[in-house]
Amino acid sequence: MRFLCCSAALLLIAAGAFASKKVISPDTSAGNEQVDIIATITLSEEEVTQKLGADPGSGIVLLHVRVVPKTDKPVSVDPQDFILLAHDDGERSKPFEPSEIAGAGRLIVSNTATAPTKKSEGFGGFGGIMAGGGGASPGNSKPVALSSKVDEKSKGNTTLLDVLKAKELPAKDASEPVEGYLYFPLDGKHKLKNLAVLYRGPAGKLDLEFEH
């Protein structure tokens, strides 16, 4: 009987430890009265290439997003409603448009405050990148001023451009579920547990964390 009691106690302790353990998954979701948002993130360049069927180059994080309206009123959906946040260094980024990845020209980004010119290979166009420092939560990040211009000497990749456009989350008023990919720039290496997706759109504000 004593042996059985000890065994039961050990099982309860193990179960409690397992229940309190944080789960880190590439899948995350959040919702409110108007909308549910489900997201799956892909970090490695090899996996991004496999899912797209084309290589967008290094430094691109792929986010598959499904937006599910929950009312009779259509929900306005736009890729620019989403932000990728790195909790560890406060870096925030809006998704690239397909033309900024595969269009003619590449994006040359520079920190106007301190850093010399920095080239981001394969990215054309403007926007997409915001840098932050010192913030470990959505409200603490302080964006760093960046300037950008296009290197007109580089040429676009029309095949990649077609793939990115076809698979991108569409901008539309949706009364039915809508889904697609978002293409985020991410500087440096970050652990999945330190990343989050912020939705800041007409349907409200949602924070989708990958660590639960």
Image (cartoon, helix red, strand yellow):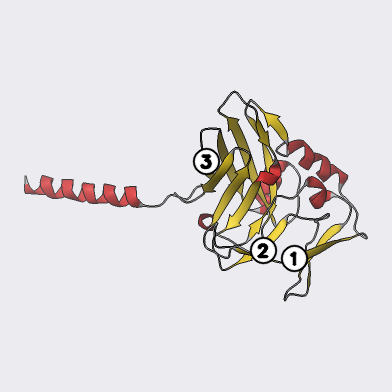
Q: Which residue is found at the position 52% from the left and 62% from the top?
A: 136
> Circle 1 is placed at which residue position?
146
Q: Which residue is found at the position 77% from the left and 75% from the top?
A: 116
Residue 206 location (% of width, % of height): 54, 44
Q: CA distance from mark 2 to mark 1?
A: 8 Å
Residue 36 position by quadrant: top right
Callout 3: few (<14), some (14-19), or many (20+) C-alpha neighbours within 10 Å? some
| Circles 2, 1 touching at the beta carbon (< 8 Å) | yes
Q: CA distance from mark 3 to mark 1?
A: 31 Å
> Circle 2 is placed at which residue position?
131
User: Quick one: quadrant of the N terminus?
Assistant: top left
Q: Height in image: 161 above or below 36?
A: below
Depth check, mark 3 against mark 2: the one in front is: 2
N-term mark: 2 or 1? 2
Q: CA distance from mark 3 to mark 2?
A: 25 Å
Q: Is residue 129 visible?
A: yes
> Circle 3 is placed at which residue position?
29
Q: Which residue is found at the position 68% from the left and 41% from the top?
A: 181
Give, as a three-letter code, the residue at label 1: Leu
Element at label 3: strand
N-term mark: 3 or 1? 3
Q: Which of these two is toward me, 83 or 71?
A: 71
Residue 51 location (% of width, % of height): 68, 42
Give, as a three-letter code, the residue at label 2: Ala
Give, as a three-letter code, the residue at label 3: Ser
Depth check, mark 3 against mark 1: the one in front is: 1
N-term mark: 3 or 2? 3
Q: Which residue is found at the position 76% from the left and 71% from the top?
A: 112
